[in-house]
Image: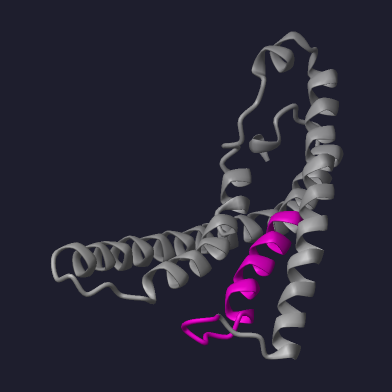
Amino acid sequence: MMMLVVLLRRFERLAVWLAGIGAMIIIVQMLWISYGVFMRYVMSKPDGMVTEATALLLFPAAFLGLAFALKEDAYPKVSFLLDALRPGGRRWLEALNLVLMIIVGAFFSIAAIKATIGSFASGASSEILLWPRYLFWGPGALALTVFTIHACLKLAVLVTSQSEDINDQ
């Protein structure tokens, strides 16, 4: 049990780092889009790379915060159902929720890993920038894999703990 909690805390730290990288990507996108708007409307010289670059950066940015949101228990919940249940029922519903997250996370992790490997093997690159596509699939695949493992660890701690709340561990 103690080893699970230690491993869970390490993945939570990794989740914070991944979310920080996602935040940096969003800042880069914001600055690049602002530059593109300035160039298009003020200088009348549109930058042809802005749209593709910021679109490619959306995929990793979208998934890098998944594990952090799970760590912070930031996903939306219908709390009236949880509040109406006894602690044992609440625990089982929380476990079911984590199982569903694991299933969905595993599916998307496998898809992203296959896409990363496929784009690396094929040498596929973006149309305008000619950036290798695996550079965009890779961080998303990593984030989805960390999310899935994090959800598995949370489920294991929930199932093996005596406490009602997993966040007490």
Q: Is residue 71 left or right of residue 39?
A: right
Identified at 61% across, 55% down, the residue is: 12
Q: Is residue 39 magenta?
A: no
Identified at 52% across, 87% down, the residue is: 130
Q: Is residue 64 visible?
A: yes
Q: Which residues are magenta?
A: 127-148
Q: Is residue 1 visible?
A: no
- Residue sitting nearer the eye, 34 or 10: 34
- Residue sitting nearer the eye, 145 or 71: 145
Residue 45, given in percent of the width and then of the height, sits at 21, 75
Q: Is residue 60 left or right of residue 24?
A: right
- Residue sitting nearer the eye, 60 or 125: 125
Q: Is residue 128 magenta?
A: yes
Viewport quadrant of the C terminus: top right
Identified at 45% across, 61% down, the residue is: 20
Q: Residue furthest top?
A: 84
Task: Say how many tags the image has.
Answer: 0
- Residue sitting nearer the eye, 77 or 37: 37
Residue 122, given in percent of the width and then of the height, sits at 74, 89
Q: Main secondary structure of the magenta part?
A: helix
Q: Residue furthest front?
A: 44
Identified at 64% across, 63% down, the residue is: 143
Residue 132, given in percent of the width and then of the height, sits at 58, 85
Q: Is residue 77 left or right of residue 18?
A: right
Q: How is the image coloured?
A: one colour
Name which quarter of the figure residue 150 lies in: bottom right
Residue 111, given in percent of the width and then of the height, sits at 79, 65
Above or below, 162 relative to 29: above
Above or below, 166 relative to 121: above
Q: Is residue 146 left or right of residue 50?
A: right
